[in-house]
Image (spheres, helix red, strand yellow):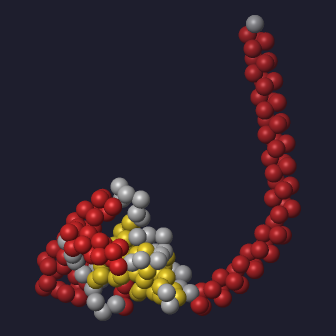
Amino acid sequence: MKKGILITIIGVLIIAISYFGIEMFDFAKGVKADTPKNIENFKINKSLNTIESKTEQKLDTLNIDNYNLLFFHPNETEFEELLKEYGDENEGLYEVDSDFGFYAKNVYDSISKTDLKVKIVTERIIKYSTKNGIKYLDRLKNEEHPYGIIYNNLNCDPRVEFGIMTDIDMFQIWSEYKKNCK
């Protein structure tokens, strides 16, 4: 009885290993056949990416066309640089960062329960569409403020607000933006 069970288990294992071995062999043949095509595609795409990178910034860029509200703020490294830059005023900078986080989270929590798309980001370059074409906002090169919010609707030009606002202010601006965007 025990020999019968043992022989059955060994038989099943041999069949399974043989089946998967044949499947892997067929898979390997397919990979081998596709390798030249993949190398050719890589070379073509690599040259296209080089051309694209000259015309469009790719690194740390976010396209906001799919978002209605976008909160932007410095990442940790940028925040450390701001602390060094402002020296004695560090306490105020911590308060600004805390206030931004608090109000942005309140708005984010409320809006995320709707069908609107909202995101909080630290990407450096923010790409958006306007009636006059595609534009870019470089957070590090803007003179206004490192914190802000972008109100966006594909039917209208985005509205960029820099600085810290309360959640009530953010909702009022959103309401006004929607009203004027037709």
Q: Quadrant of residue 176?
A: bottom left
At horizontal 30% and vertical 58% (from top left) the residue drawn is 109
| Front-lying residue, 39 or 160 | 160
At horizontal 82% and vertical 37% (from top left) the residue drawn is 19
**Residue 39 at x, y = what percent?**
78, 72
Residue 170 appears anywhere in the view: no
**Residue 29 at x, y = what percent?**
86, 55
Q: Quadrant of residue 76?
A: bottom left
Quadrant including the C terminus: bottom left
Instruction: Using residue 115 as the reference point, say whether residue 143 is left or right of it.
Output: left
Quadrant including the N terminus: top right
Instruction: Using residue 66 as the reference point, say whether residue 40 is left or right of it.
Output: right
**Residue 68 at x, y = what percent?**
40, 70
Residue 5 appears anywhere in the view: yes
Residue placed furthest toward the top: 1
Query: Number of marks in the image?
Result: 0
| Front-lying residue, 96 or 168 | 168
Q: Please determine whether, in this image, residue 43 is positioned above or below residue 19.
A: below
At horizontal 44% and vertical 70% (from top left) the residue drawn is 67
At horizontal 38% and vertical 66% (from top left) the residue drawn is 118
**Residue 40 at x, y = what percent?**
80, 75
